[in-house]
Amino acid sequence: MSGISASLTPPADAVAAVRHPDAPAPGELLGAHYGQCFGCGEDQPHGLHLQARAGEGVSLTAEFTVQPAHQGAPGLAHGGVLATALDETLGSLNWLLRTIAVTGRLETDFVRPVPVGTVLYLEAEVTAVAGRKIYSRAAGRIGGPDGPVAIRAEALFIEVKVDHFVDNGRPQEIKAAMSDPDQLRRARAFEVNP
Ligand SMILES: CCCCCCCC(=O)SCCNC(=O)CCNC(=O)[C@H](O)C(C)(C)COP(=O)(O)OP(=O)(O)OC[C@H]1O[C@@H](n2cnc3c(N)ncnc32)[C@H](O)[C@@H]1OP(=O)(O)O
């Protein structure tokens, strides 16, 4: 059984999302936005190391392999880790819009168990935009694009200013990210249009 809450249904005045002209080309890897990100960061030993690839329009695909560190029950992925994979995949869509946004609401359906060792294949798209609100959905399949659906999500991201991170993040990480000599990495840590 599944059903989304009213706050995830775009209002009547919502419009279609517009892909930013500088968005990565379809097929291009997006790369990690921040090395310490639990979803995609290469410097997080137990993170998901999720890799997202731009799709057509405002859509993308992503993959991650469920590791022993991601278990809930013996041999099975933890539901919270799967929700993280969905959150990360959906959050990556905002890079195609070049909009800085954070997850306001994430509703997840867990359809079937996901064993350790599974390559989870995710697809996500922005369905509508209404002012600062970005509506999106994603699904994760076992093994590949034609595999059985294991997880699904609908989400609402809210556009924020970069101050959201600067004002709320722990100062030592903010300072380190802002003093990164690599301009692109510095911008992407906060998902700012470089
Ligand atoms: C590549 C990058 C990948 C990153 C993937 C990971 C993404 C993340 O996990 S981000 C981290 C998790 N999220 C957070 O920490 C966010 C914490 N929450 C907040 O900071 C705030 O609540 C925030 C910014 C979302 C909204 O606050 P604020 O800016 O004051 O907006 P506010 O005026 O309350 O709401 C704006 C609109 O959104 C709606 N809204 C806000 N929150 C929600 C919600 N939870 N559910 C439904 N609607 C909501 C409001 O109803 C309002 O709608 P309307 O304009 O129609 O009245």
Image (cartoon, rainbow, N blue to C red):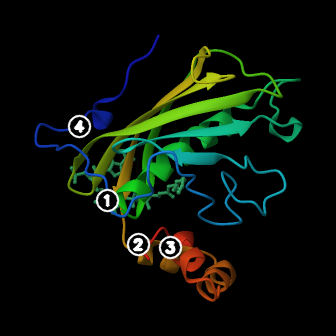
**Alpha carbon distance from label 3 to label 1:** 22 Å
Quarter of image, res 7: top left
Secondary structure of residue under mark 4: loop
- Pointers 3 and 4 in contact (CB under 8 A)? no
- Pointers 4 and 2 in contact (CB under 8 A)? no
**Alpha carbon distance from label 4 to label 1:** 21 Å
Q: Nearer the viewer, mark 2 or mark 3?
A: 2
**Residue labelled with disc 1:** 20
Location of residue 189 with respect to 175 vertically, above or below: above
Q: Is mark 2 within 8 Å of ligand 1?
A: no
Rendered location of residue 47, percent (x, y):
76, 51
Secondary structure of residue under mark 3: helix
Secondary structure of residue under mark 2: loop
**Residue labelled with disc 4:** 10
Residue 165: mark: 3
- Residue at (47% x, 39% y) in the render: 106
Secondary structure of residue under mark 1: loop
Label 4 CA crowd tier, 10 Å (few <14, some 14–19, many 20+): some
Mark 2 or 1, nearer chain start? 1
Q: Nearer the viewer, mark 3 or mark 1?
A: 1
Location of residue 29 with respect to 43 vertically, above or below: above
Mark 2 or 3, nearer chain start? 3
Rendered location of residue 26, percent (x, y):
45, 46
Quarter of image, res 178: bottom right
**Residue labelled with disc 2:** 193
- Quadrant where the C terminus sits is bottom left
- Pointers 4 and 1 in contact (CB under 8 A)? no
Q: Nearer the viewer, mark 2 or mark 1?
A: 1
